[in-house]
Image (cartoon, rainbow, N blue to C red):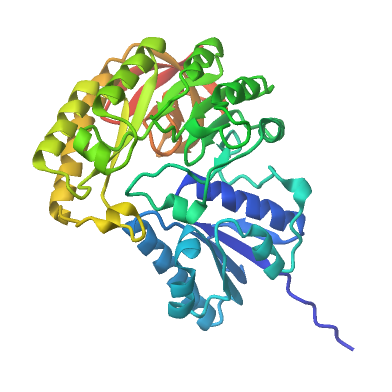
Amino acid sequence: MKVRSLKRDKVNVVTLGCSKNLVDSEVLMGQLRANEFDVAHESEQDDSNIIIVNTCGFIDNAKQESIDTILRYAEAKESGQIDKLYVTGCLSQRYKDSLEAEIPQVDAYFGTLELPQLLKKLEADYKHELIGERLLTTPSHYAYFKIAEGCNRPCSFCAIPLMRGKHVDRPIEDLVKEASRLASMGTKELVLIAQDLTYYGLQHYGERKLADLLKNLSDVNGIEWIRMQYAYPSQFPMEVFDVMNERDNICKYLDMPLQHISDNMLKTMRRGISKRRTIELVDQIRQRVPDIALRTTLIAGHPGETDQDFQELYDWVEETRFDRLGIFTYSHEDNTHSYTLEDNVPEEVKQDRADAIMELQQGISVEMNEEKVGNTYKVLFDRKESGYFVGRTQYDSPEVDNEVLVPADSNYVRLGDFANVKITDASDFDLYGEVVN
């Protein structure tokens, strides 16, 4: 008598959107692996019979990418290529009812905080003892490190509180435990992320605790770089910069999305900070840490943005000379306060304004990079590509910032290791150099 062997389920997790979503996928995969599932992340093999799409719902382009991805796997399910399709994440949190009606081929939709329910659907147990553990999708030498969930800020344009809920801190002791575990696995760099790093501590401890968290993480053996992304400018805890100056393993780097500079737009956007205070804050940060690299993100074309508002923004970017800068065109998001305003800046004007800022920033970046030629920097190497070892200085975050390229035919480095590199040439967003002893 022949016994038919049951094919083991294999899960492919597909992640869309930001690094915070990526961490959620890594936690999900860690739980699945602990439940003895065969799990992969964005596998290019067609051998997975269960697909989980972790969606983004931040702006129109991201929502469309998420919908297109769901539809592609829905077709695969209809044609028998996969058995089950599940959708989770921000888009699913925000538009669950509409998605269920429009794409019924999906077996179940889950929100951003429904990991236990998703696991239950897969007949897997949610293992509380695994909190803080995950399967890294990044190279093992760096990890995105989520210190809080949700956001309490009232920004008029932002739908994140609708998708992620109120701000909830993770306790310092839990974060130190996770950092220690990552370090034991070879992680050397922690990229601190949250919807708002600045708010850290207020929910759990009743006071801002980002500086204390940095001190505790800095003490973890094996962690050589700690960098901060997504810090809100209003009521910034300035003691953070004392810690940055005291501790060698805290990168002199800060990502602080400022969004705009004209008082008219800052008030309309409900940012809780004025032009004068923003300029003072940037000046104070640079006085405290003169060699800090400041990254910011801006929005072009928010409802009510006049030519004068944009000119103010342009002039300020020109004067301030950010080390790194990105800009989005405004996306009219339903159920936000800005959605009650007329989306009165034409799309082509939004794009022209964004392009003008990026062209300006490109010139600033070229000049700043050229000033680095002849200097030597500690570089962490991420990958080998097109004949170069590619790495980053402490002034650059993975995937979004400048990179250092070292010719592979005349240099040797191990990926995931640090090396000192003397800069020999510069372009708009890259530095070129040679390894020195």
Residue 384 seen anywhere in this rendered image of the structure: yes
Residue 408 seen anywhere in this rendered image of the structure: no
x, y (%) of residue 227?
Answer: 50, 27
Tell me: 107 left or right of 397.
right
Given residues 387 and 186, the one toward you in this image is 186
Q: Is residue 116 above or below residue 234?
A: below
Given residues 69 and 318, the one toward you in this image is 318
Given residues 413 and 350, the one toward you in this image is 350
Q: Residue at x 53, y 78 (%)?
A: 77
x, y (%) of residue 222?
Answer: 66, 23
Tell me: 44 left or right of 289.
right
Q: Residue furthest bottom?
A: 1
Q: Is residue 128 above or below residue 280?
A: below
Q: Residue furthest left?
A: 307
Q: Is residue 196 above or below residue 368?
A: below
Q: Residue at x 68, y 70 (%)?
A: 121
The quadrant in which the N terminus is found is bottom right
